[in-house]
Image (cartoon, rainbow, N blue to C red):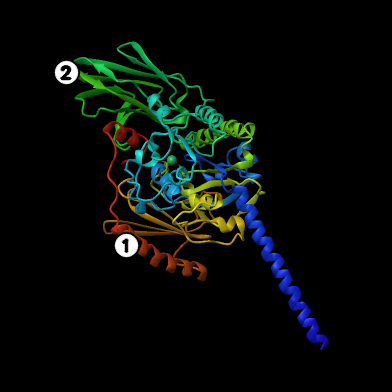
Amino acid sequence: MIAGKQVLLSRVMTTRFLLIVISMSILGSCQNQSRTKGANLIFISLDTTRFDYVDSGWGAKSKTPVLKNFSKKAQVFEKAFVTIPETLPSHLSIFTSYYPHQLGVTQNHFRYDGKYKLIQEILKHNGYFTYGIISLMSLIEPGFWKDFDEFNSKLCSEEIHHLFLTADKISLHARQKLRDIKNKKFFMFVHFSDPHYPYGPPTVKAIMNIYQDGKKINELNPYKGKILPKIKLLPGIHRFRFDMDYPTSDFQGIGIIELTPDANITAKSENIEFRKDIFSGCYFLTGQSGWMNLECEEEEWIHLQVLPKLKIKAARIMYQQEVEYMDKHIGEFLQGVEEFNLFDNTIIAIFSDHGEGLGERDGLVGHVEYLNQQFIRVPLMIYIPGKTQKIITSPVSMSGLSSTVLELLNLGNENFQHSFINLIEKEDTPNENIYSFTYLPGSKANKISIIKWPYQGIYYWKNNSRNKELYNLILDDSFSPMAQIDRKNLISAEREFFSFFLSDSLRHKKKIGQQKFGKRNINRKKLEKLKRLGYIN
Ligand SMILES: [Zn+2]
């Protein structure tokens, strides 16, 4: 009897306890929703920023005190991966929660037909004022910027002689805009590109002088590169001379590229050679100075672009400094958020669209081609008002970011796919496998990466050739060298992953094969520019 009472009592207690727990969690989730429902949203995209160069609290290859400080009050994702290492498709994927082949945009110069809703479209329809500012030409695509009430890309086109806008300018304009819209409900997209090639941090003051027939016509910082204004050439021979006032030890050489390749010009030169393998073919200055004679039979216009090819060691130093410079100016923007008292009602996500190879794989400096960690693992931190810092160790796909913040804002979306809100609000246990892709012709093969931590498999195919790579990402923690697993001596966990990876990549390959990819949306000038940035072979 007594034992029966005890059981009954303990059942009542258990039920009460459960009720308390349930009501606390309902209360908690209501509090959470009321905290973020109707909040503003800021996306800060750090183009080309690798995970291991941002200090999110545990050290990094760059000193980024601003981002480190931000991380202290953010949801910090240790393992975030983009769906593609290329600017436009990666941003579209982040803004829609779909993969590039589902969107029909697998390269920078493709047109987006609006098949799936972008986050700004959903927010605009829910009463948000939507504003975007970009620093790089690759995002000038009407399909991407539709549904922004205001989209500042003029800065890029006004300063056509530079390849991207520096962080000081982006931060200044974004902060001014913040002042204008602070009393509205808003979504702001701020895009920094300093770590993008060419790496020329403001501390590097080198000068290259350019002379035409003995007269100086231009000067530039050879680390930063430059697109020169068009030059009219009368029939005859014209001597162009390029002089650097800086020791050339950082450079493999400087590419001098003609943007009007159909001009009928023949060249003779000294210290300048024509190289087919660099920048899809260019004149290449290999010494401290050099000259070339351009001869034309009739009047011609030429359009020169000067781009550096750094040695790996110098590229790493300059890249690091660019990240540090950007960090400082993100700080100025965040000061604006503080000054206008916006931290109480604004969700802020800081992330990157892809990483960057710095010579670890085939000596490549750049992105697009490979799917190793250097190219696809990126920083991701989300500040949510009222939430304390949480370090999240489960891997996530950047394609889940928009779904996650829309859920935080309590806004309906027909498909919250890839959302990782459960990792923020509940337990940090792995959600789903992580997929990334590259596609022909931007990449030399179609590739699929599948990550099931700690393993990554990469499958690639072109015509009849197939290849597979298998990695243990924990062993590749330093990001160099890459720890490829020997497939002849697999342990059981590796064998299990490898078998899953083979069947799953074939399933995705079939889906990709059925897709029709978008049309090019580009004029010739833009095409040339993208070629120089390494986007088109
Ligand atoms: Zn990018």
Q: Residue furthest top?
A: 215
Q: Secondary structure at mark 2?
A: loop
Work out whether residue 450 or residue 3 is closer to the camera in this orientation and state it.
3
Residue 347 x/y as whole percent:
58, 44
- Closer to the observer: label 2 or label 1? 1
Work out whether residue 451 or residue 286 is closer to the camera in this orientation and state it.
451
Circle 2 sits on which residue?
298
Q: Earlier in the sequence, mark 2 or mark 1?
A: 2
Q: Quadrant of the C terminus?
A: top left
Q: Quadrant of the N terminus?
A: bottom right
Q: Residue at x 80, y 82 (%)?
A: 6
Left/right placement of residue 262 relative to residue 128 reads: left
Q: Residue at x 31, y 49 (%)?
A: 440
Left/right placement of residue 379 relative to residue 209 reads: right
Q: Secondary structure at mark 1?
A: helix
Circle 1 sits on which residue?
510
Quadrant of the rendered structure where residue 266 is? Answer: top left
Q: Residue at x 49, y 49 (%)?
A: 402
Mark 2 is surrounded, within 10 Å at the Cα level, by few (under 14), some (14 to 19) or many (20 or more) other residues, namely few
Work out whether residue 101 or residue 238 is closer to the camera in this orientation and state it.
101
Quadrant of the rendered structure where residue 140 is? Answer: top left
Q: Which mark is residue 473?
A: none
Q: Name the residue type under label 2.
A: Glu
Q: CA distance from mark 2 to mark 1?
A: 53 Å
Q: Residue furthest right?
A: 2
Question: As displayed, is residue 208 above or below residue 418?
Answer: above
Q: Can you see residue 108? A: yes
Question: As displayed, is residue 168 above or below residue 415?
Answer: above
Residue 67 x/y as whole percent:
60, 39
